[in-house]
Image (spheres, helix red, strand yellow):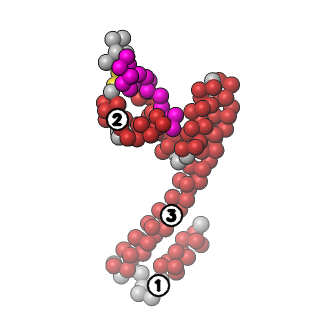
Amino acid sequence: MKSNLQKTFTIGEFAQLVGLSTYTLRFYEQEGLIIPKRDDANRRYYTEQDVSWLGFLLHLKGTGMTMSEMKEYVTWRAEGDQTIAKRKQLLEKVRQRANKQISDLQHNLEIVNHKIDWYDGKLQCTISDDESFAQYLQKFKKES
């Protein structure tokens, strides 16, 4: 594609490489999250740096960062080092929210695990027929 030594990728190659559709890549481009380069024929192309950048964006998305927050982060990044404090503050907010979601998920999983154990107890006749799941859960609240 380009004659320099840097490896480049068409949008199809890039999509396959990063595991996204070309539609999603075009959407990210429209939102200003990625900016592909253009060749002399005005065709998009991407580089290894774009692979790394998109990988980081996907990590941000994976933490639950909203599209609005991602756009804000990208804007601040483009403004340079004077925005590092703002970017760090945004990432700390996202981290706090993600940690809360993880905590909530762990609690919900704990309840599901207790329900499975309760079912096992019912099936193995180690829990009496008249013991409800709510009563079973009370055992664990006392231990906490």
Nearer the camera: disc 2 or disc 1: 2
Give the Cα separation between the discs numbered 2 and 1.
Answer: 54 Å
Choose mark 3 or mark 2, whichever is in front: 2
The residue wearing badge 1 is: 131
Q: Nearer the viewer, residue 124 or 73?
A: 73
The image position of residue 26, as x and y in percent, is 42, 37
**87 in the magenta segment:** no
| Residue at 61% in and 37% down | 72
Q: In this rendered view, identify the residue nearer to me: 65 or 10.
A: 10
* CB under 8 Å between discs 3 and 2: no
Residue topped by disc 2: 15
- Given the current orientation, which residue lies at the most extreme bottom position? 130
Asked whether the viewer can see residue 26, the reply is yes
Q: Is residue 26 left or right of residue 138?
A: left
Q: Magenta span covers which residues?
A: 31-49
* Residue positioned 47% across, 62% down in the render: 109
For residue 108, the mark is 3
**SS state under label 2:** helix
Q: Quadrant of the C terminus?
A: bottom right
Marks 1/3: CA–CA distance: 21 Å
The amino acid marked with disc number 1 is Glu
**Alpha carbon distance from label 3 to label 2:** 35 Å
Is residue 47 something that shows in the picture? no
